Image: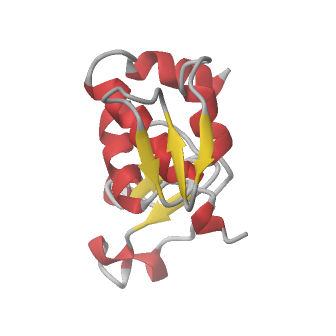
């Protein structure tokens, strides 16, 4: 299975970074177009799983902090969602949440449906970013 089918979409990652302020994931989306092309030739980069990157040079993190987004996996999303949350295959789509409610989400992948539910729960204040981060980092 392709990695991109196991993680939430870039758009969901951008939204979750904003809502979770930020949180860590084993995978990251990088938007290199927001950084000057010479930047990466000037600073050595070390990227660790679940960590932000570090490098020699002043202002490195200030430049990069806006170009990465956590690409949460199904396992990471499952940990952040409430225990009673379930996901299942619904024909050709994936579903997550409680049928017949506003929190019943469909997605092309399991991660897509789960990320939609997580975003909805945080936006409706049924779940806080603090709870999500605490569960993820436990």
Q: Residue at x 47, y 26 (%)?
A: 98
* Image quarter in which the C terminus is found: top right
Residue 21 can be seen, yes or no: no
State which quadrant residue 18 falls in: top left
As displayed, is residue 90 above or below residue 19?
below
Colouring method of the image: secondary structure
* Count of number-bearing discs: 0
As displayed, is residue 18 above or below residue 82?
below
Whole-percent x and y of residue 62? 33, 52
* Relative depth, front residue between 34 and 62: 34
As displayed, is residue 72 above or below residue 134?
below
Whole-percent x and y of residue 52? 53, 49
Residue 49 can be seen, yes or no: yes
Whole-percent x and y of residue 12? 38, 51
Q: Residue at x 44, y 59 (%)?
A: 9
* Image quarter in which the N terminus is found: bottom right
* Relative depth, front residue between 124 and 51: 124
State which quadrant residue 22 falls in: top left
Q: Residue at x 35, y 26 (%)?
A: 101
In the image as oriented, which residue stretches furthest toward the right? 1
* Relative depth, front residue between 3 and 133: 3
Q: Give the left or right position of residue 118, taking residue 96 as reference.
A: left
């Amino acid at each position: 299975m392709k990695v991109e089918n196991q993680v939430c979409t870039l758009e969901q990652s951008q939204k979750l970074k904003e809502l979770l302020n930020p949180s860590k994931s084993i995978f990251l989306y990088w938007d290199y177009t927001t950084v000057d092309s010479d930047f990466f030739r000037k600073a050595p980069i070390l990227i660790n799983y679940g960590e932000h990157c570090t490098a020699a040079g002043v202002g490195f993190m200030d430049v990069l902090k806006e170009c990465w987004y956590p690409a949460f996996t199904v396992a990471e999303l499952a940990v952040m969602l409430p225990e009673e949350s379930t996901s299942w295959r619904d024909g050709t789509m994936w579903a997550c949440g409680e049928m017949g409610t506003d929190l019943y989400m469909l997605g092309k992948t399991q991660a897509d449906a789960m990320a939609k539910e997580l975003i909805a729960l945080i936006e409706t204040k049924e779940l806080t970013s603090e709870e999500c981060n605490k569960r993820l980092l436990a």
